Amino acid sequence: MSSTRTLIRGGLVITAADETHADVLIEDGRIAALAAHGTAAADAWTADRTIDATGKYVIPGGVDAHTHMELPFGGTFASDTFETGTRAAAWGGTTTIVDFAVQTVGKALREGLDAWYAKADGVCAIDYAFHMILSDVNESTLKEMDLLVEEGITSFKLFMAYPGVFYSDDGQILRAMQRSSANGGLIMMHAENGIAIDVLVEQALARGETDPRHHGEVRKVLLEAEAAHRAIQLARVAGAPLYVVHVSAEEAVAELAAARDKGLNVFGETCPQYLFLSTDDLAEPDFEGAKYVCSTPLRPREHQAALWRGLRTNDLQVVSTDHCPFCFSGQKELGRGDFSKIPNGLPGVENRMDLLHQAVLDGHLTRRRWIETACATPARMFGLYPKKGTIAPGADADVVIYDPHAEQTLSAATHHMNVDYSAYEGKRVTGQVETVLSRGEVVIDRREFTGRAGHGVYTPRSTCQYLS
């Protein structure tokens, strides 16, 4: 096969570590070399294709470590397939997703994993990997965890929420943590006290409080903080690392910060919806608030400052989307008259990189921290670095040419996610993805999709790279 070379000239290359005006040479799907723009070395390079990035940023493709394509939930399915969801991700400058394979209670992990391999096989526009959701911790599934780690499925999600669906009790959680402590896996935790929340849901509905805003009111901040605290203590007992997903509240950040101050391997993720949206959105009239129902729920706006601070101080390390879209029409509407029946989840895989760039302009993050939280850290956290998450010789050529000056208005009319509303409808942001390469192949070419279903490949992962 003949070698193909692509040259990206004149851009500002931004990684988690530094910013340099450099030209990037890509050969056979990988970064071959970088050289300072205008130097003899760079000027001597030739290529089959040259991309002019003058005045633009050249950044690593985003790594979204928390998505749910085609997830069965509440009697329906997330509206994005692996094909539509990964295409939308590419449009938004994300070139790798880590999705969640689901174990059905009473069935083997392997069965759930194989079902997800089958869903994604041959249809993804970008590269993908899997975490495993444990719904049923027992002797045989604990043994299976060891085999999955060897296979490159190195993280396992447990739920302290959703009794009767995904819920694990403290004993099951402890056993899974002990196993991960031995096999090198990372436990990811949905930290909300689901047993207590169910009581509050029942009481709210009995009082006739059925609107979407009550979803946020019953899933109390204290029950997120309590569950985070409990998860941390169980992880300490097990001697295991812990990654808390979709942290939404100041009190939960404080629990993570306290654990990290003790030197524990405790990590936290938040999502754009908690940084940019609030209970004001959940309270929208005429059932419009249903569009914003997700768990953990949106919080009062005053929690946002603590989340931004956590991202700056590294008490929170990752921004993922928890992309789990349900159409307003026919799906979110299942919960009219009963907020507890609204499918939980928001669309966002296409918006993350742009929203975080806006956060840079708003003074919340530096440019390098933007890349760190959206690309490099998720890649390291889940064993994909430096193949993914950076621009360096030998890395996969997952590269985004980003126009930091382009202005856009986020809208369902223009997004590419397979969902009939935008959680950020009408929000004006500055910065837009212009061109995207996935393993050296141009999948978005100056705001035109040139990729294809099946270009994306399954990517096994090593264990968490933050564990000594």
Image: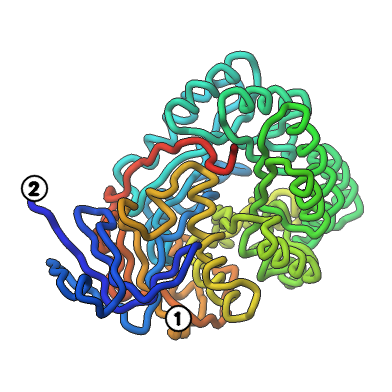
Neighbour tally class for label 1: few under 14, some 14-19, many 20 plus, Cα within 10 Å = some
Residue 89 visible:
no
| Res 93 quadrant in image | bottom left
Q: Residue at x 54, y 56 (%)?
A: 325
Viewer-proximal residue, 113 or 6? Answer: 6
Q: CA distance from mark 2 to mark 1?
A: 37 Å
Q: Are marks 2 and 1 in contact (CB under 8 Å)?
A: no
Q: Residue at x 20, y 75 (%)?
A: 40
Residue of label 1: 404
Going by the numbered disc 2, the residue's amino acid type is Met
Question: Against 43, is 245 above or below?
Answer: above
Going by the numbered disc 1, the residue's amino acid type is Pro
Viewer-proximal residue, 263 or 190? Answer: 263
| Res 166 quadrant in image | top right
Which residue lies most toward the left here?
A: 2
Percent across and percent down for residue 145 are 55, 24
Is residue 84 toward the left or the right of residue 163 in the image?
left
Q: Residue at x 85, y 57 (%)?
A: 209
SS under mark 2: loop
Neighbour tally class for label 2: few under 14, some 14-19, many 20 plus, Cα within 10 Å = few
* Colour treatment of the image: rainbow
Q: Residue at x 80, y 42 (%)?
A: 227
Question: Against 277, is 128 above or below?
Answer: above
Residue 376 visible:
yes
Q: Quadrant of the C terminus?
A: top right
Residue of label 2: 1
